[in-house]
Image (cartoon, coloured by chain):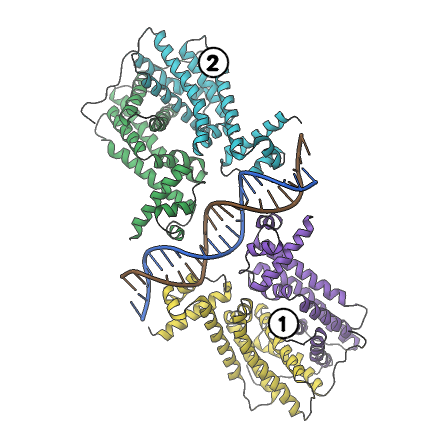
Chain colours: A green, B cyan, C purple, D yellow, E blue, F brown
Amino acid sequence: MPRAVREQQMLDAAVRIIGQRGYMAASMDEIAELAGVSKPLVYLYLNSKEDLFTACIRREAAALTEAVRTGVRRDLPADRQLWDGLRAFFAYTAEHPDGWSVLHLQARTHGEVFAAEVAAMREDIVAFVTQLIAAAARDAHRDPRMPEREVAGLAESLVGAAESLATWANATPGVTARQAAATLMNFAWAGLGNLMGGQVWTPPPGEA
Amino acid sequence: MPRAVREQQMLDAAVRIIGQRGYMAASMDEIAELAGVSKPLVYLYLNSKEDLFTACIRREAAALTEAVRTGVRRDLPADRQLWDGLRAFFAYTAEHPDGWSVLHLQARTHGEVFAAEVAAMREDIVAFVTQLIAAAARDAHRDPRMPEREVAGLAESLVGAAESLATWANATPGVTARQAAATLMNFAWAGLGNLMGGQVWTPPPGEA
Amino acid sequence: MPRAVREQQMLDAAVRIIGQRGYMAASMDEIAELAGVSKPLVYLYLNSKEDLFTACIRREAAALTEAVRTGVRRDLPADRQLWDGLRAFFAYTAEHPDGWSVLHLQARTHGEVFAAEVAAMREDIVAFVTQLIAAAARDAHRDPRMPEREVAGLAESLVGAAESLATWANATPGVTARQAAATLMNFAWAGLGNLMGGQVWTPPPGEA
Amino acid sequence: MPRAVREQQMLDAAVRIIGQRGYMAASMDEIAELAGVSKPLVYLYLNSKEDLFTACIRREAAALTEAVRTGVRRDLPADRQLWDGLRAFFAYTAEHPDGWSVLHLQARTHGEVFAAEVAAMREDIVAFVTQLIAAAARDAHRDPRMPEREVAGLAESLVGAAESLATWANATPGVTARQAAATLMNFAWAGLGNLMGGQVWTPPPGEA
DNA sequence: AATGAATGAGTGTTCATTCAT
DNA sequence: AATGAATGAACACTCATTCAT
C-alpha cells in the first residue's frame, strides 16, 4: 500500500479521534489502531503527535477553504457570492463535524502554534468577506467612508456568526445548511446594506 | 481561614491556570501551588479535577451573566438594552480573559459534560436576546410572522458574532468594549429592523 | 520513613543495577522495584535517570575517596602513605564491585557529563599521587628536575595500573587487597626511586 | 560489490558509531546509514546487533595485536622489545580512537560476552609482557624466584598502566606516542630491574 | 543481492488521586 | 483543618528485528 494513501488514513483516524476526544485525550495508540497500522508507522510518517496534529489542521483547513472556494463563482454579484459561500461552508461543516471540531475547537485550545495555523486560514476567509462587503458597497454606488477597522469588525462579526451557527446547526436536528445560510443572510445582508447607506446605529450620548 | 474563602482562592487559581494552559495541560499540582494550599485540600474541597473544572465553569458563567444582567435596565427600549448588554459583555470578557477562555474555549473542548454546562448559560443569553428581538418587533408595531426557530437562529447569530468579536477585540490592541459593541450594533440592529419590516433576503430559486 | 533514608536506598539499588546491567540497560522500573518503592517516587526524589546516575556517581566517588583518605595518615613517609592508600583502594573496590563498576566503567562510557564527574575525582587522586612522588624525591634529598608533565604521566601510570589491578584482583579469585597493593608497590616504588635518582631509561637513538 | 568489502564498510561504520556514541546508544539505523547500505543487509551479513558488536571487537582486537606484533622484532633485547611494543601500541590507539574506545570502554561495559572477547586479546598481550619480564630476568642472569601469579600481577600492572596512559595521551594534546612510551618505560623498567635483582619493597609488619 | 515497509516490546516520564497522620 | 509522602495507570516515543518482494 503506497505511502500517500496510508498517510491519509492516518490523518483520517487522527481527525476523527482528536475531533471527538480532544487533542490531549487522543492517544497515539488509539489513532494508530483506528488507522489500522502500528504506532511506530505513525511516527515514521508523521514524526510526533504535534506534527500529526499540525498536519490534520492543515489538511482540514485546506479542505474547508477549498470547499468554500469551489462553491463560489467570482463573477456573480456579491450577495450571491456570500450566499453560495455560506451554503458551502455550512454544508461542509455539517458533513465533517470532526474536521470542524479540529479546526474550530481543538486547534484553538492547545497552544499558539496550532492556533496560528487556523488563524491563517481564518484570515483568508475574513479577507474574502471583507472584500465582498466592499464590493456590495460599490455595486450600490455608495461610498461607505468607513474606517478599515470598522469593516474588519463587521467581517469578523459575520464570520464569527457563521462559525457559531455552524455549531448550532450541527447540534440542532433538522436545520439544514440552506436554512442556516438563509438565516445568516437575512441577519447580515440587510443590515450591511443599511450601513453602506449611512444608516448608522447611534449610541446614546453621555457615557464613558 | 474559612472554607468558602479558600474555595474561592482555589477557583481563582484554577481559572487562571486552565484559562492559560488549557484544561488538560493544567496540573492539579500547579493549581494547588498557585492557590497556596496543599493538593489534598483541593481534593477535600472539590473532589476531583472534573468537579473543580465544573465549579470553575459555573462560577464564571454566573459571574458573566450577572455582569450582563447588571448592565441592562429592563425598562429601557430594546435597542438600548442590547447596547447596554453588549457593552457589559465586552467589558467583562476584556477584564476577565482567563474566565472567558474557560467558558468560550476550554469548557467547549473537553467533553460533553462541560460543554453542557456552558450551553445552559448560553441558552439564557440567547433567550434574552430572542426576547429583545421580539420586543423590538412589538415596539415597531409589526408582526414579524417569523417561525420561532428562525428567530432563534437570528439570536444565535447575534450571540455568536458577539462571542467572536469578544475574542477578536481581546486580541486586537486598541479596540475598546464600546467600539466592539458599536460595531455589532451597527451590524445587527439595522438588519434586524429590516427583517422585522418584512424585507427578507430572498435566496435565488432553483437549487436543492 | 524519612526522605534521606529512602534516597539512599534508591541510590543503593541504582548502583547495584547500573553496576551490573550497565547504565542504559538498567531500567527505572527495575531500580524502583529493587529499592522497594514506586517509580514516581524515584522521579520525585531524583528527577530523571540522568540525575539519578549523576547522584550515584557522586556518592560512589565521595565514598571511594573518603575510604582512601581515611586509610592514609599524612604524617607518615611517602611510601607508607602510598602503601596505605593502595590497600584502602583495593579493599574498597573489592568490597564495592558495583560502585567500582559505576565509576570505572559506566560513568566513563555514557556521555561527557558523567565522564567529567569521575574525571574530577580522578584528578584529586592523581594530584595526591603526584604529590607523593614529589615528597618521595624530597625525602631522598634528590632533585628530580623532571618536567611537570613527565611527573603527571608517572602518576597517571600508577593510578591507571592501580585501576587495572583492581579489576584484575576482583576477577582473579584468591588475590587479596594486600597482595594487589604489594604487587603494585613493588612494581612502582623501586622504579620511581631509580627515576628520582636520575637513572632514566634511554630510548635507542635514530628513530622518528 | 563483493560481500567481504561491504562487510568491512559495515564494521567501519559500526566501530565509528559505537566508539563515539556507545554501544547501546548506537542505533542500527545510524550504522546502516553511515555504511551506505540498507538495514536488512546489515542483518543479512551480521545477524544481530550483538553479533555485529562481537565482530567489531574481534576485528579491532586483531588489528591492535597485529600492529603491536608488527612493531616488535623478537630477536632484539627484552627492553627494546617492550619499547617497540609500547610505541606501536600508543601509536595505534592514537590513530584509531574509535577502535580503542570499542575495545577499552565499550566492550568491557556491556556484558560478559563482549568483555570475554577483549579479555582473550588482553591475555595474549599480558602473556607477551610476562614473557618479556622473564626474559629480562634471564638476560640479567638472575633467578627472580618469584611466584607466577606475582609476575602475572606485574604484567597486569604494566598493561593496565599502558591502557590508562593511552587514554590519557589521547586526551592530552601534545603528548606523542613516543613520549607516552618513554614515560612508561621509565616508570616500569627500572623498577622491574630492581625487582629482578631482589630489591623487593617490604610492607610494614603487624597488619591484617 | 538488496530493500522499502512495517512492528512488538519496552523506555523514561507524568499525573490525578489517596493514605496516614 | 490540613498535609507530607506515596502510587497505579497511562502516554509519547524508540529500536532491534523481520517480511514481502
The correct choice, above or below, for A194 with respect to D18 in the image is: above
Any part of residue B50 in sight = yes
Measuring from the top left, give residue B23's x and y in whole percent.
49, 35
Mark 1: secondary structure: helix
On screen, residue D11 versus residue C108, left or right, reads left
Mark 2 chain: B
Foreground residue, C203 or B4? B4
Q: Residue at x 57, y 35 (%)?
A: B31
State the residue position of label 1: C167
Any part of residue A145 in sight = no
Mark 2: secondary structure: loop
State the residue position of label 2: B72
Mark 1 chain: C
Q: Residue at x 56, y 37 (%)?
A: B28
- Return the residue found at the far bottom: D141
Q: Amino acid at mark 1?
A: Thr
On screen, residue D69 versus residue A80, left or right, reads right
